[in-house]
Image (cartoon, rainbow, N blue to C red):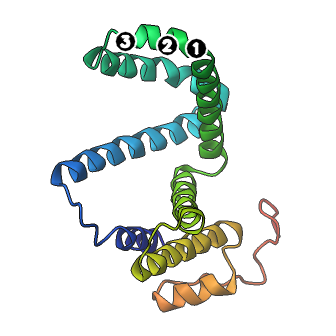
Amino acid sequence: LIVWVIVGATVSVSGDIHFSLVGIAFQAISQVAECIRIVLGEFVLTGRKLDPLTYTAFVAPTCFVVLLVGNAMAWNSVIIPAAMAHWRLLLVNAGVAFLLNVLTATVIKEVSAVGFVLTGLTKDIVIVALSCILFGEAITRTQILAFCMTLAGVGMWSLMKISPEAPALRFLKRALCMPVAVKSELDPLLPGKKV
């Protein structure tokens, strides 16, 4: 199912006329770093049993140091007066960023790293669809089909998590020549109960 979603997402961005190898390299490095961050976040949140607020307090200083280095590299003397002039907007932005980080940690803890990434893909598709509807942005038929393919894969993954024995999943397992588990009369209906 994950390969299905990856293929759909890959096809949706094919055919772009502004191809840049440097851009692809930066994007690949960014994606690898993001995946490592999400998987380590899931490990810390579920394996170490941290709550989302503690996780955010644990990660925030590291992010601050990285941003401080980036800020030092791109320093401009106009930054301080601009920050003082717009301190209210910066304060609201900091609050929203804090809430976003806590909600991200909550989703990773409750759903999983894969579920968080699939939620992000769905969000991206909704943004593109709304920009097409509201602002008249052009999307191709190939992109529409790829978006549908991606959303169908996300839906199947969700169904697999909610109801692993659903008929659609059993059909998909048979179509992919995967073994389908058959319950016997001796299998308990509730987990942990012995017959």
| Circle 1 SS class | helix
- Please, what is the three-letter code of the amino acid marked with disc 1? Trp
Q: Earlier in the sequence, mark 3 or mark 1?
A: 3
Q: CA distance from mark 2 to mark 1?
A: 6 Å
| Circle 2 SS class | helix
Point out which mark residue 83 bears.
Answer: 2
- Please, what is the three-letter code of the amino acid marked with disc 3? Val
Residue that mark 3 sits on? 78
Q: Nearer the viewer, residue 127 or 131?
A: 131
Residue 26 x/y as whole percent: 25, 45
Question: How crowded is the residue under tag 1: few (<14 C-alpha within 10 Å), some, or many (20+)?
Answer: few
Q: Nearer the viewer, residue 74 or 50?
A: 74
Residue 36 x/y as whole percent: 39, 42
- Please, what is the three-letter code of the amino acid marked with disc 2? Ala
Point out which mark residue 160 bears.
Answer: none
Q: Nearer the viewer, residue 12 or 35?
A: 12
- Asked whether the residues under the numbered discs 2 and 1 touch, taking CB atoms below 8 Å apart as contact, a structural biologist would say yes
Residue that mark 1 sits on? 87
Q: Earlier in the sequence, mark 2 or mark 3?
A: 3
- Asked if residue 88 is positioned above or below residue 159 in the image, the reply reads above
Question: How crowded is the residue under tag 3: few (<14 C-alpha within 10 Å), some, or many (20+)?
Answer: few
Label count reads 3
Residue 161 x/y as whole percent: 65, 66
Q: CA distance from mark 3 to mark 1?
A: 14 Å
